[in-house]
Amino acid sequence: MGAGDVIELEGQLVIIDFKLFLVPEEYSENYEQGDRVEISRPEIMFSIMDKILPLGGGRSSIFHRARISGVIESVLPIKVKATSMFVEERGGGFVCIDIEDDTLEKNKPRYDEFLRKNQGVKSDDWLDYL
């Protein structure tokens, strides 16, 4: 497995340190430090939040099962540029997430504002970041 390879992944999609990651289905309690794959273009999180219901609290508003196809950008640490993404809605099926470049460009200012607004916040509950 190397940079440029196409890969298909399944796992739990989660936000860690304002970035989007896929952790294994059987994640440990300390999932933030365990095996994980970073999804490039973290502004995708806003495309996801526009389509699915967020969790009611906790460290991440997104902690949903996902299927992702993409291209490996780097191996150490592993980072993938998603080419397709499906996220499971609670109590429903998988929802296709719009990750087209024009959509992500529209979400980039939302992500930049999110970072700027929450730079000094240290909390274990994502609701504190609203």
Image (spheres, grey):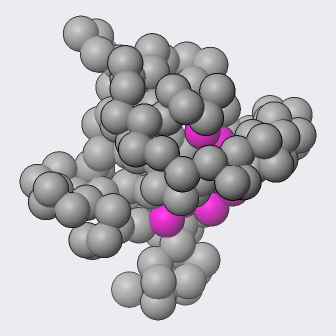
Quadrant for the N terminus in the image? bottom left
Instruction: Relative to 50, say whether 83 is above or below.
Output: below
Residue at 57% x, 25% y: name it. Answer: 49
Residue 66 visible within the image: no
Residue 105: image quadrant is top right
**Which is more toward the observer, 54 or 78?**
54
Q: How many marks?
A: 0
36 lies left or right of 112? left
**Which is more toward the observer, 93 or 38?**
38
95 lies left or right of 58? right
Q: What residue range appears in magenta? A: 38-45
**Which is more toward the observer, 102 or 78?**
78
114 lies left or right of 18? right
**Which is more toward the observer, 36 or 114?**
114
Residue at 35% x, 34% y: name it. Answer: 58
Q: Position of residue 73 (x, y in %)?
A: 60, 77
Residue 120: image quadrant is bottom right
Q: Position of residue 8 (x, y in %)?
A: 37, 58
Residue at 17% x, 50% y: name it. Answer: 25
Residue 108: image quadrant is top right
Quadrant for the C terminus in the image? top right
Instruction: Relative to 11, say whether 46 is above or below.
Output: above
116 magenta-colored:
no
Instruction: Relative to 125, say whether 69 is above or below.
Output: below
Instruction: Relative to 95, say whether 80 is above or below.
Output: below
Q: Position of residue 14 (x, y in %)?
A: 40, 46
Q: Position of residue 7 (x, y in %)?
A: 41, 65
Residue 57 visible within the image: yes
